[in-house]
Image (tube, rainbow, N blue to C red):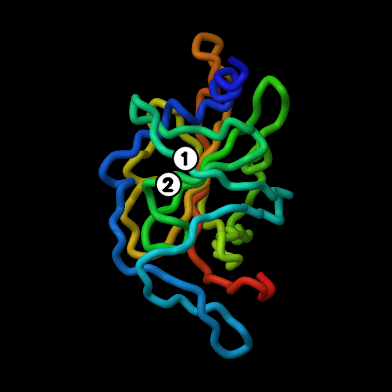
Amino acid sequence: MAVVVLAAAAGVSAVLLPGKEARQGATARVQPATGAKGRAIPVARRQMPIPIHIAIPAIGVGARIVPLGLNPDHTIQVPTNIAEAGWFRPGPEPGEVGAAVVVGHLASLGGAGVFWRLRYLRRGQLIKIRLIDGSTVRFVARSMLRVPKGRFPTRLVYARTSKPTLRLVTCAGSINPVTGRHRDNYIVFASFLGVTPGGAAA
């Protein structure tokens, strides 16, 4: 019962409705490589390792990433721990061509969630995703969008982008007393900067 309350308070589970846009095949991918001065260079490959950690230094986020699938009603699952973020596993891994989606709770009855401060992230600030092989995929925040849950932009969030992109999704607004969920969603759109191999400074 406690898990249900936490998920409802964050409200993420009821609004992400992945369709065909979310199930992107393995086409051109990227892998870590280095050039002069150790800079990350995108190189085509088929598959990236799974993500295990997200860091957003500007807003003090550092959290484990867990894989998520779909509920029976085709909404996205949410992390059972409000301190963890969740990656939508049917979509691309961060760093692959396409839109990787990471969701996190805003808050619960027990306190602030992993993305409590996401609304303070600004354009141009860094997002780092560490992969299971030790490499780090770097993104930069480009735009933010707040929308009512009933008008969640599914096609935009799960778009088939021609380059690696990242979407961070949480809740926003007051809690609807009828549903017990926040009224809005808050989405950060981020673009790919590069991949730093494990052991190198990210």
State the SS at label 1. Answer: strand
Q: Earlier in the sequence, mark 2 or mark 1?
A: 1
State the SS at label 2. Answer: loop
Residue marked by disc 1? 68
The C terminus is located in which quarter?
bottom right
Q: Is residue 105 left or right of residue 20?
A: right
Residue 26's place in the image compared with 109, above or below, is: below
Q: Is residue 121 left or right of residue 167?
A: right
Q: CA distance from mark 2 to mark 1?
A: 6 Å
Q: Residue furthest left?
A: 20
Contact between labelled residues 1 and 2, with CB atoms less than 8 Å apart: yes
Residue 120: x, y in percent? Answer: 66, 45
The quarter holding residue 26 reads: bottom left
Residue at image point 68% right, 20% down: 109
Label 2 environment density (alpha carbons within 10 Å; few <14, some 14–19, many ≥20):
many
The quarter holding residue 72 reads: top left
Residue at image point 57% right, 27% down: 10
Residue type marked 1: Leu
Q: Nearer the viewer, residue 105 or 45?
A: 45
Residue at image point 52% right, 26% down: 11
- Which circle marks residue 89 in the picture? 2
Is residue 174 visible in the rendered image? The answer is no
